[in-house]
Amino acid sequence: MSINRRKRILISNDDGYHAAGILALYEALRDLGDVTVMAPEQNCSGASNSLTLAKPLTVRQSSNGFYVVNGTPTDCVHLASTGFFDDLPDLVVSGINNGQNMGDDTLYSGTVAAATEGFLSGVPSLAFSQVDRGWGNVEDAALVARSFVKMFLERDIRTPLLWNINVPNLPLSKMTSVEVTRLGRRHAAEPVHVVVNPRGETQYWIGAAGAVKDGEEGTDFHATAMGRVSVTPLQLDLTGHEALAETAAALAGFQLTTG
C-alpha cells in the first residue's frame, strides 16, 4: 500500500441511501479520503446479517453519486468487498443509525451487520448509531464519527476489528467523554401488535424492544445515559466456551437411535 494513496472509505447503513444519518456521515467524511457510499434502496432496519440469495441484485447510482442496492446492508458491503469495485476499502463505516444499537439490539441490527461484513472481509469496521430516534443533533454525531475515522487514518490501523459505537443525541460540547463498554442486556421483547385490516384479515406488527435488564456501570446503556459515547468491541465467536464442559457432561452416554 502506497503511503501517499488516499485511503478508501466505504460507507453503508440500514436506514437506506436517502436517510439523514448517512447523508450527514458522508458530508463529515468526504474530505478524509476516497469515500464511496453503497447503501440499501429501502429501509432495512432489523435485517441483521441477511444476504439476498433468491434473486439477483441490481445496483444503480443516485444523483448524488451514491450506489444504491435493492438488497440488505450485508448485501451492500458484500458486493463492495467481493468484486463490484476493484479494491477492498481500507475502512468500512456504517450508519449513522436512527436509534440505538445496544445490548441485544446488535443481533438484529442491519447497521452492525454492515460493519460485520466489512470485518469478515478483513477490513477494520465501525458501526455508528444515535441513542434516540429522530435525528436530533445528527450533525454532532457525524462529527463524532469523523473524529474516530481521522484517528484510524492517522494511526494507519489496518487490523480487522469491529467496533459498535453509540452516540448520545447531544451537542458535541455536551458529550462528556468516550467509554469502552460491554454490551448490556434487555428483557424479552414486547408482545406483537395484532390488527385487523379493512379486508378483515388479521395482521401482526413486531412489538417494541424489551426494556433494559442490565444497564449497570460499564455497559453501553449506562455510558450513553451519562452522556458518554459508548464503544463496544465485538467478536463473532458465538461459542459458549464456559458451557462446553457442562454440555459434554449432559451428553455423556448419549447415543443416536433409530427408534
Image (spheres, rainbow, N blue to C red):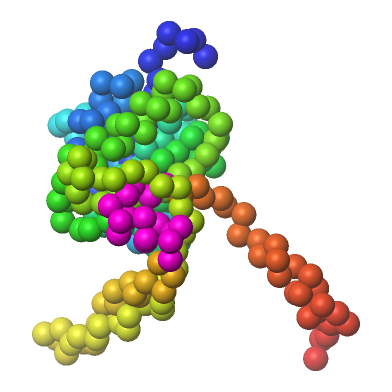
- 188 to 152, vertically: above or below: below
Residue at (33%, 47%) from the top-left corner? 229
Rendered location of residue 252, percent (x, y): 86, 79
In this image, 117 relative to 14: left or right?
Answer: right
In the rendered image of this protein, does residue 133 appear above or below residue 191? above
Q: Which residue lies furthest to the right in this view?
A: 253
Most foreground residue, 30 or 155: 155
* Residue under the image location 45 percent in, 38 percent down: 125
Magenta span of residues = 216-231
Q: Does the magenta stretch include residue 218?
A: yes
| Residue 218 appearing in the image | yes
In the current view of this chain or complex, which residue is farthest to the left?
198
> Which residue is at 42% across, 12% downward?
5
Count every numbered label the image shows and give the total. 0
Answer above or below: position of 200 versus 17: below
Image quadrant where one finds the C terminus? bottom right
User: Residue 63 falls in which quadrant of the image?
Assistant: top left
Q: Residue 241 in the image: x percent, y percent?
A: 70, 62
> Is 228 placed above or below 145 here?
below
Q: Where is residue 250 in the image (x, y as percent from the top left)?
A: 78, 80
Magenta stretch contains residue 230:
yes
Q: Can residue 82 be seen in this view?
A: no
Identify which residue is drawn at 56% across, 50% down. Answer: 235
Residue 208 picture location, percent across and down = 29, 74
Q: For this view, does 134 lie left or right of residue 224?
A: left
